[in-house]
Image (cartoon, rainbow, N blue to C red):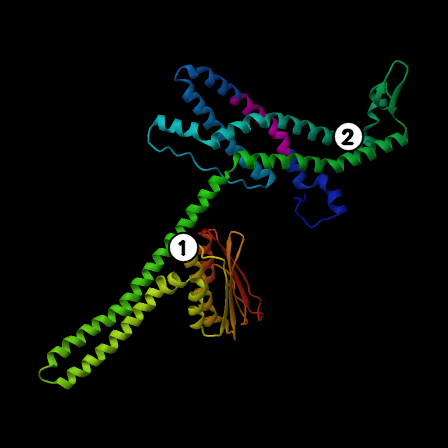
Amino acid sequence: MDDGKGGRGGAGAVLWAPVAGRTWREFAYLLVGLPLSTLYFSLAITGVSLGAGLLVTFLGVPVLAGVLAMCRGFGRLERARVRALLGADIAEPAPIRAKKSGVLAAMGAVLKSGSAWRHLLYSVIHFPWAVFGFCLALTFWAAGWAYLLYPLWFWVFPTYTDQPGLQLFQNDDYSFFLDSPAEIALTSLVGLALTLATPWVIRALTTVDRVMVGGLLGASRLDSRVTELESDRGVVVDTAAADLRRIERDLHDGAQARLVSLAMDLGMAREKLAGDPQAAARLVDEAHGEVKIALQELRDLARGIHPAVLTDRGLDAALSAVASRCAVPVRVAVDLPARPAAAIEGIAYFTVSELLQNISKHAGARSASVDVWKSGGRLLLQVADDGRGGAAVSGGSGLAGLAERLDAVDGVLVVDSPEGGGTTATAELPWRA
């Protein structure tokens, strides 16, 4: 039996829908939904009524907390049922966490949980909808197949009853039976129409269920945002740790090593100063050269942390300075009415810096361009080159890491890089000024 996801389309999809696997699963969902919803409704109403009645005593509090916890269990079952029969993966709501340990703190956390109260609401309001969906789906299903197959079973009436066929209506003087060949054929056609319409009726009913389960039993927008921020925080922490390791490595291998060499040279010069002034002078000259190199490395390191030109003169001057160090000619155009937030300005600077480094190392380009502008409440950056293309934001690449860092501040990175057609990377950041 087809699962309803095959390649049938148009008229074929309509004709196949009554026997498709998806239709049978959705029909089973509606049939099973009524007894489950009846159980949810009965237990929820009984529990809430009992808890409300006992609120004059302390016993009402644990009863209500128990009812809410029970409804969350109902929600877990409903999400599993939707996933198994409707193919919809509903995100789990955030777990209930008490700020303190103890039974009272746990009960208080349950009673304060918006997710728990939404589960209770679902247990109550889904019951009338389940009754409606069950009755409508079963009526369409039974009537459609019964009328469609009427030519095969109408003989039951004249054989085992005193009626010539299925009776539609009767009054005192007249009765109408479906017994003539034309009436039997017409009945079968009506049944065909109902049978073909039934899958779409069922699909509409289950669509409402998907929305209801997703809205009341799934993760709220706040829960999703908290999860996203926790993930972004992990990315930021990892990025910060990597930057600290890079700075430590650069200091250890660069400026620190040169300063150690400088100290040794100066020590040797001091020892030779009295006996061999010329050798001491050579050592001092070498030490002077080491000082210049160390200073340059420290300046480069400071620029990599946060360039002074960015703080003093903004993105236009800072990006022009970065572009001047690129291996290919770069056109820079910055059109901003004001300066964005300092943190966003720094992220924009390092984003363009990394993209230009990629162009220098990998693009094989002859020229590049950098455009920066504001659109609404967003800062947009676009870095383009005429190189070989083929860049992708895939796992493990530098662009993937850059995209993760932008995502941590609600930013977006889009890369368009066809083979042989150059690369255009567009970044979007919040303005937050």
Q: Nearer the viewer, mark 2 or mark 1?
A: 1
Q: Percent from the top left, x then y, of residue 364?
A: 50, 74
Q: Percent from the top left, x then y, of residue 118?
A: 51, 30
Outermost residue, top side: 172
Report the label total. 2
Q: Identify the mark at residue 146; answer none if there is no mark.
A: 2
State which tag comes first along the sequence, 2 or 1: 2
Q: Is residue 397 visible?
A: no
Q: Residue at x 60, y 29 (%)?
A: 33
**Dividing the picture into quarters, in which one does residue 16 lie?**
top right
Q: Residues within 10 Å of mark 1 (few under 14, many from 20)?
A: few
Discs 2, 1 touching: Cβ within 8 Å? no
Residue wearing tag 1? 343
Q: Percent from the top left, x then y, of residue 44?
A: 52, 23
Q: Residues within 10 Å of mark 2 (few under 14, many from 20)?
A: some
Give SS at disc 2.
helix
Amino acid at pointer 2: Ala
Q: Is 295 located above or below residue 171 in the figure?
A: below
Which of the two residues, 83 or 302, is positioned nearer the viewer here? 302
Rounded to the nearest angstrom, the CA distance separating label 2 from label 1 is 69 Å
Give SS at disc 1.
helix
Q: Name the dominant secondary structure of the magenta segment.
A: helix
Q: Which residues are magenta?
A: 28-44
Amino acid at pointer 1: Ala
Q: Is residue 112 visible?
A: yes
Q: Percent from the top left, x then y, of residue 88?
A: 58, 41
Assess whether residue 323 is covered by the magenta stretch. no
Q: Quadrant of the N terminus?
A: top right
Q: Residue at x 66, y 29 (%)?
A: 133
Q: Residue at x 9, y 82 (%)?
A: 274
Q: Is 18 located above or below residue 125 in the figure?
A: below
Which of the two residues, 65 or 80, is positioned nearer the viewer here? 65
